[in-house]
Every structure is written in structure tokens, then in C-alpha cells.
Image (spheres, rainbow, N blue to C red):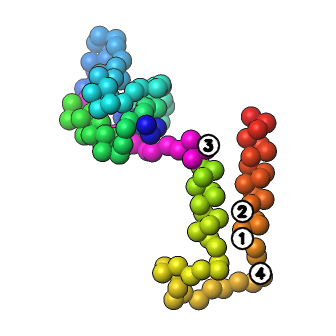
Amino acid sequence: MAYYLVQVAFSSEAWGAMLKKPHMQLEDLRPVLERLGGKLESCWLAFGEYDALLICQLPDQTSAAALSMAASAGGTIRTIKTTPLMSMEESLDAIKKAVGANDHGSSSPISANLPMLRLKQVDYRELLSSRLHKFKQRWKRW
């Protein structure tokens, strides 16, 4: 299952209800998540543009969109923002794919007709490979 960051801003009515009878509106999202095949990993209240942050797992993007729609329809949420998250392993895979996609030996349809300006010859594969190596070394220290 994929991980998502869900940022929520409550409506003034929701804050009013929580102040009258102290409870957490986020608990109302748990059954919705479970009906969508998801799982609530963790949640926090926050200061700033959003009042709460949730980390949850959902089977797919359609389920993530459905969560956003269902939560918004309840009237207690003023704004909701969903961001897909990638694990470190997925991030490393993406970096490796970027190295292959950035191979200058082949021309892509996007850049085929664009002039390439370079001040000096750079081996991007070597550059990305060395940065990936440094990233892995730092990751091991954490």
C-alpha cells in the first residue's frame, strides 16, 4: 500500500464543536480510511496553514481521492491536501531511473528539437552516481 501525507484545516464549526465537547475530529476519519482499505499510521495537530497532519496508507490514488472527497463532504474540514509519499527505497529507485533517463546517448522526444547549451562537458551519470553514493553513506549513519 502507498503512504500519503494528509494535511487538514478544520472549519470554524468543527473547532466550535471540539471546544464545546473536547474530542478529536480526526478520529472520524479512521472508519472512512478503513472502509477504503486504508490504515491511519499517525496524526498530529499543527500550527500554521493546516490544523492537523496525518500519515496514512491507502491502496491507490483513487482511494486517496475518495478519502479527500468523503472528508470534505462532512462539513468539518475547510481544506484538505493529500501528498503521495515515497519510501527511501522508492526514492533510490527513482534516482536510479533518473540516471538512466538522463542518458545523453539517446534523444528524447521532449528535447529532440531543443539546442543544448553547455559550458563544459559534464558526465551526469558519474555525477549522479557519486551523489547517490554519498546519499547512501549518509543514510547508513542515520
Query: Label 3 sits on what residue type?
Result: Met
Query: Label 2 sits on what residue type?
Result: Leu
Are the residues at dot 1 and dot 2 in contact (C-beta closer than 8 Å)? yes
Tag of residue 88: 3
Whichever of callouts 4 and 3 sits on the residue coming sooner in the sequence is: 3
In space, the residues marked 4 and 2 are separated at their CA atoms by 15 Å
Frontmost residue, 94 versus 49:
94
**Label 1 crowd (10 A; few <14 / some 14-19 / many >=20):** few
In space, the residues marked 1 and 3 are separated at their CA atoms by 22 Å
Q: Position of residue 51 (x, y in %)?
A: 42, 31
Position of the N terminus, as image quadrant, is top left
Q: Determine the secondary structure under disc 4.
A: loop
Left or right relative to 39: residue 102: right
Report which residue position mark 2 lands on.
128
Region in magenta: 76-90
Residue 99: within the magenta? no
Query: Label 4 sits on what residue type?
Result: Gln
Report which residue position mark 4 lands on.
121
Frontmost residue, 81 versus 86:
86
User: Residue drawn at (72%, 62%), measured in percent from left and top?
Assistant: 128
**Label 2 crowd (10 A; few <14 / some 14-19 / many >=20):** some
In space, the residues marked 4 and 3 are separated at their CA atoms by 31 Å
